[in-house]
Amino acid sequence: ILCFKKFMDKISGRTAQNKDNARRNHDLRRRTLLAKHQAGLPIAQDSDSVIVMERDFFRIKGGGNEFCLSKNKITDMCLKTDFEIERQYVSSAGGAVAGAIVFGALGAIVGGRVKEKKKRINTYYLIFTYRSEDEINYISFEISQSDYVGKAWKWSRELRNQIAENSQNQIVEL
C-alpha cells in the first residue's frame, strides 16, 4: 500500500509540490523578522510588527497596516543595544542554618546575610535611517527574541555593503 501511495504521489506531483512549498516556507522564514515598533511609523508604540526583506524593499506589517521601505532610500541600517542591569537581593536560608550549626548565632547572621545578584538584560533595537524627499527620517524596532538578533545583524551587514557599493555622497541642507 505504501509503495502504491508513493507511486501515485510521484505521478500526481504531490511530492514535488510539498518540497516546493517547504522550500518557499523556509525562504520566507529566513527573510522574516518579528519585532515591536518603537518610533517612526504612524502606528502605536510596542505594537507587534513583522518585517519581511524583499529583493528591493522591506515590507513592514503592523497595526493593521502595511508599509514598504525601498532599499535605495535607506542611508543606514544598524542594530543598537541597551543594557539594563536588574538587581535582586537574595538571602540564603541554607547558609544561615549551616552557619548556625558551625558557629552559632553569629554564624547564622553571616551565613544568611542578604546578597546582591546582578542580572544583565540586553535590549536590541533595529534602526532604519532613510531619506524621504529632502528629509532624513528613521524607523526603530525593538527585537526581543535572540534568534532574530543574528538575522538583524546579517541584514544590516548586507545592506551596508550594498550602500557602500552604490554610495553617492548626498548633501543634506540644514
Image (cartoon, rainbow, N blue to C red):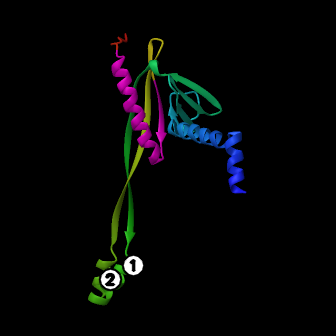
Foreground pick, 143 / 16: 16
Pick the quarter of the image with the C terminus. Answer: top left
Residue 77 visible in rendering: no
Q: Is residue 144 magenta?
A: yes
Task: Evaluate if marks 2 and 1 touch, with contact meaning CB atoms under 8 Å apart.
Answer: no
- What amino acid does circle 2 point to? Ala
Label 2: element kind: helix
Label 1: element kind: helix
**Measuring 38% from the left and 65% from the top, which residue is drawn there?**
89
**Measuring 37% from the left and 80% from the top, which residue is drawn there?**
94
Q: Which residue is mark 2?
A: 108
Q: Which residue is mark 1?
A: 93
| Mark toward the start of the polypeptide (2 vs 1) | 1
- What amino acid does circle 1 point to? Ala
**In the rendering, at what x and y percent does residue 119 appear?**
37, 57
Task: Give the magenta range.
Answer: 138-167
Q: Quadrant of residue 86?
A: bottom left
Q: Is residue 35 magenta?
A: no
**Measuring 65% from the left and 39% from the top, which residue is drawn there?**
17
Vertical relation: 171 (above or below) 108? above
Point out the frontmost of discs 2 and 1. 1
Residue 32 visible in rendering: yes
Is 162 left, or right, of 140 in this rendering? left
Judge the density around disc 2: few (<14), some (14-19), many (≥20) Cα neighbours within 10 Å. many
